[in-house]
Amino acid sequence: MEIAQAAREEAGLALDAARAVRPPLGMPREPPDEFEDEDEGYHKSLKPRHVQMIAMGGAIGVGLFLGTSQRLHNAGPALVVAYAVAGVAAFFVMRALGELVLYKPTAGSFVAYARDFIGDWAGFASGWMYWLNWAMTGVAEITAVGIYVHYWAPRFPQWLSALLALAVLLSVNLVSVRLFGELEFWFALLKVAAILAFLVVGIVLVATHAGVGPTYHAELPNLMDHGGFLPRGLWAVLLSLQSVIFAYAAIEMVGISAGEAQEPRTVMPRAINGVVWRIALFYVGAVFLLVVVLPWVVYTPEESPFVTVFTYLNVPGIGGIMNLVVLTAALSSCNSGLYSTGRILRSLSQRGEAPAFTGRMSSHHVPYGGILFTSVVYVAGVALNAFLPHKAFEIATSVASLGVLTTWATLLYAQIRFRRAAERGEVRRPDYRMPGSPYTNWATLGFLLLVLVLMVFDGEQKWAVAAIPFLVVFLLAGWKLINRRRAGGVLSSEV
């Protein structure tokens, strides 16, 4: 009898403990303590203007400034439709992120949300895929730096331009997050000013039916001339979706900055809402004007389309100015890559899912271990520029797209699980919510799956397709090793 009584008492204590962890139905719990642990050591150095410009700058990168030329060459004027469709998907991704960020701002961002609402394995997989995204994106950006420098110095080695750019940006990121925020603020401000200037000039040219170059005029018939709106067919437009998705990459970085932002619950909704008009204006609007101001056949993959337009206008020095702007865009994106991967790797390291070195913090509240870890890959990108200067950008963007698709899918599905937890009364949803959830989540996930399938049929994406089995093996083997070490009693930080 005494044994039975002791067993009942022990079961009662266990039940009380379980109730303490998971409140009864209808009593939402607060965000888990692990979110606070992930933000330990960070300093709230990013002001509202920094966050706003990080969000805005994330929507304007080398994918727009350089990659658009290649996409126009492949798809023709109908590329504007691809940008619009992918822009809708990007909007829903950002709104899913926004709801999760308002639930709990954290530097671990979607990695922390994936762990809490999907499972530890999801946090591990999405974190490393996001790191892959930015590692490869950084390689693409420093490749773009070398290409842009060729505008002024055609004989200057492309790899050396990339190395010098990396050295400067690495130094900035290692000093302080405040310095990163300031640099990114001015980078983004210059990019926004340049795009707005192009939009104003383009609208004026079209409205006045102005001549552009010796033989062309800015006019709507440019959309249909030279083969029609779909000169290479609908299939070419569908195949362009992967590279268009890459162009939108980095818009989710504002979620990572939330962990170091002042007043995140006030700033974040405004920053995320701005994504809607930025996508419509900067991407869809800019691409539309490009194919109206000049026929699509004029643009070449070797030169930014914005540089092409201003060169045709024959304004002294304007081509060089625009080239400086697109160079800034590449530096900005690489700068963001070092920043974001440093925070994500630290989040992984705190759970024993990344090397312990990547979790180290400096006295300036900078996760220098993760930043240095990523910089090693960027150095490899410099080598890629030395040996394959004409293939470096293609290889990097192709593989990076896999990370973008994984990150976006994780955010969408984590929000679905978060919503279900709210319906069970386990968490409290913020007032800022994902519109149309869960239907918009599933529709956007279906779109991302379509993009992934299309990559298989795109010969230019052979690098990404070839990388998929290796990534699957790496993630499965890594997760199995981590579980084995945990089962053996190894502390989570000792990996």
Image (cartoon, helix red, strand yellow):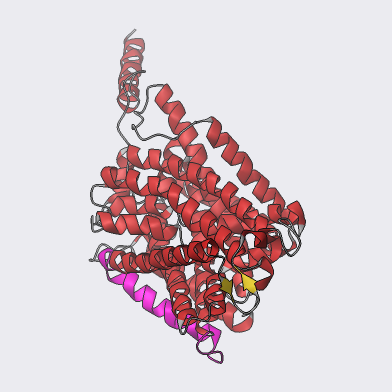
Q: Residue 472 location in percent, x, y?
A: 63, 52
Placement of the C terminus among the 4 image quadrants: bottom left
Left or right of residue 263, residue 223 in this image: right
Looking at the image, residue 10 lies above or below residue 354 = above
Quadrant where the image shows the N terminus: top left
Residue closest to the far top: 1
Q: Main secondary structure of the magenta part?
A: helix
Foreground pick, 350 / 43: 43
Q: Position of residue 256 (x, y in %)?
A: 37, 52
Decide: is 326 above or below 258.
below
Residue 154: x %, y % from top left: 56, 89
Lateral position of residue 327 relative to residue 396, left or right? left
From the viewer's side, name the closer residue of 125 and 64: 64
Q: Is residue 350 visible?
A: no
Q: Which residues are magenta?
A: 151-179
Residue 191 location, quadrant: bottom left
Residue 347's x, y, as percent? 38, 52
Q: Give the image quarter of residue 303.
A: bottom right
Outermost residue on the bottom side: it is: 155
Residue 238 magenta-highlighted:
no
Q: Quadrant of residue 79?
A: bottom right
Q: Residue at x 48, y 58 (%)?
A: 282
| Front position in the image: 146 or 173 | 146
Residue 272 in sight: yes
All told, the count of numbered labels is 0
In the image, 15 versus 25, the foreground residue is 25
